[in-house]
Structure formats: structure tokens, C-alpha cells
Image (spheres, rainbow, N blue to C red):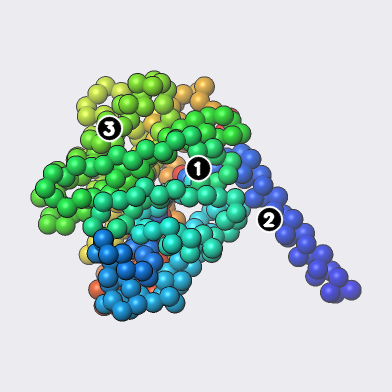
Amino acid sequence: MIIVDRMLYLAIITLILFDCTALKAQGNFEVMFYNVENLFDTLDNPYTIDEDYTPFGKLEYNTERFNNKAANIASVINASVDGGMPEIIGLCEVESTVALDALFSQLNNAKQYTYLTSGTNDRRGIQNALIVHQRFEIIETEVHQVDLKKERPTRPVFCVHLEDTQTKARFWVIVNHWPSRYGGAEESNWKRMAASDVVLKTIATYRKQTSKSSIIVMGDFNDYPSNESLMNLERCKGKKDPCLTSVHKYLHEEGLGTHSYLGEWHIMDQILVSNHFLKDSSNELKITPNSGTIVKHRWMLYENKEFNDFLPSRYFSRDGYFGGYSDHLPVLVKVMTN
């Protein structure tokens, strides 16, 4: 009798979880961005600088470490929202489809998703990717290069046009990984401004097609919400009506962050949305202002005694193999349907 009751209990729980996932896919949905910190495969690409991430490289990146890395990143995605995964997930620092396939093999409900990659001219071979639930139809994709003149190439701006098959609403998702602050924040600022300009020109093109373009811009911008590159993005270079609004900026103002440098938290990663999501009552999809969140579970962090804080647990640190997740935390926002 006890066995029967236990089996019945497990069956009920399974049905509840299934129903929650089904209902979630039919109504509101979540959008997430995650810098996964060097999700490389173990293969040596002769055209990129990826030798450290091979079995005989400096990091001794063998099959076991590769599979553990993919499993760790998958565990974060799987635990990021209640009732299943986010329906749209932007990633950066992914090397290849081999790496993405390894990640996919560990994801819950992976059969309900597909992924797209941007390709890259980055010398390390890292690129952007977008994981998309089957409720969304992929209309088209675009890749826009960021011209840094004689400097080493950077990651492109990756644009994906989607249609929500339930509401028939169409919107663009723009995935970014802007140039780093290597060499100094001020000295490298022009590079991120160049990336910002590419995004602005792309948005202007979409607005010419329809004045009510719905756009979600996400990424690791390697800048803070208060920096010039992102303020220009929000203001459309000083135009009267803002182009975009950050749903994570308020967290920056509260001293929270997605990345810690020398013990100080900053919002490096965020999601910005066009105002049609926020203010247009006729829009089928809506986002509440200042509703962005950070995915931050205790098990994703380690205790840093020097800074007396719990910081993101990296997979590799300066001291070598650490076995964590990423040096960045993911960001999330909920999109509601009418």
C-alpha cells in the first residue's frame, strides 16, 4: 500500500510539473542572457587561438573538463526560472556548434528548442548564439560586423527576427558581446562606441520598416549602464524619444551586478527593450519597467575572503582549474502576453 501511494504521489508530481511547463509555454515567457565564460570544445581550430582549450594545452582541457563545463552551464540555465527553461536564451563566448551540442545534451526539454550561431572574426573564435523555443518561428537572421579598423576583429552584432506563434507578434532579438576594456576603460571606449553605433544603425533600419518595431537588445557590453556607449543606445544619440530602456539599470543604481572586478559589483550584462514593450497598450507583448532580474544561486558562487563576499565561481581562474560556472551571472526578464 505504501509503495502504491508513493508511486501515485510521484505520478501526480510529474503531471503537475508537466502542466506547469505546458502552461508556461502557452502564456508569458522569459528571455535570458548569459556570458558562459569560454565554452570551448577540445578541438584545435588552426584558424583561431584556442590552443589552451585542448587536451595538451596549458589548461589541460580534456573531454572530462569539457563535458563538466557544458553540464555546469546547463545546470544554471535549467535552474534559472520556475517551471522550465527560459524560452529565449542569448549566449556569448561559445566557440562552436560542437560546444553547443554538448550543452544541449544537458538541457531540460532540449527537444523543444533550437539554436543559431553568429559566426565570428574574433581571433579566439568565440561567437554569440541564441537558443529559441519551438513556440517561436525564426523569420530571418542578420550578422553585422563591428569595424575596428586596424585593431583585431571583435564579435559581430547578431540579430534574429522571431514571431511568437501564439500572439503572432514579431520582434527582433539582438545579441551582443562588445569589445573588452583591455588596455584601459577610457582608452578602449571608442571600440564599444563603434559597437553601439552598429546597433543604433541596425535599429534605425528596423524602424524604417515599421515605426512600431519591437526590439530586445541583450549582451555583455563590457560597459556599465552609466557609460557613454549604453547611454547613447538608450537615447538614440540624443533624440527626443528614447530608442531603448534597460530593464536592469535600476540594479546598477542599487549597487548590484552581474560581474565583480576587484570586489566591486557592476552590471556588465543587461537587457534593453524598445518602448513598444513598455508603453504601447496595443502591443501584444509587454514588459514591466525595472523588472529585470539576475540569476544568482548560492551554489553558483564561492566565498572570497579577500573581499569578504560571495563571487561568481569561474571554471578557470588565474590559478588554473576551478571547476565552477562562469565569471558572469545571467540576466533575465519576463515578457507578458495580452
Q: Are marks 3 and 1 in contact (CB under 8 Å)?
A: no
Q: Is residue 185 above or below residue 232?
A: below
Q: Residue at the front extreme? A: 46
Residue pointed to by mark 1: 334
What is the secondary structure assignment of the residue under circle 3?
Answer: helix
In the picture, residue 249 is in which quadrant? top left
Residue 78 lies, in percent from the top left, at 53, 59
Q: Is residue 317 left or right of residue 277?
A: left
Q: What residue sits 59% from the left and 30% below the top?
A: 167
Which of label 3 and label 1 is nearer to you?
3
Q: What residue sits 58% from the left and 44% below the top?
A: 134
Residue 43 lies, in percent from the top left, at 36, 69
Check residue 266 in the rendering and tell me which mark sits there, or answer none.
none
Q: Is residue 233 above or below residue 34?
A: above
Residue pointed to by mark 3: 200
Which quadrant does the C terminus fall into?
top right
User: Mark 1 to mark 2: distance in Å?
Assistant: 20 Å
Q: What residue sits 32% from the left and 68% below the top?
A: 44
Graded by Cα atoms within 10 Å as few (under 14), some (14 to 19) or many (20 or more), the crowding at tag 1 reads: some
Residue pointed to by mark 2: 17
Graded by Cα atoms within 10 Å as few (under 14), some (14 to 19) or many (20 or more), the crowding at tag 3 reads: many
Q: Along the polypeptide, which appears first: circle 3 or circle 2?
A: 2
Q: Is residue 272 left or right of residue 153?
A: right
Q: Are marks 3 and 2 in contact (CB under 8 Å)?
A: no
Residue type at mark 1?
Lys
Residue 62 lies, in percent from the top left, at 39, 77
Residue 75 lies, in percent from the top left, at 50, 64
Which quadrant does the N terminus fall into?
bottom right
Q: Residue at the right extreme? A: 1
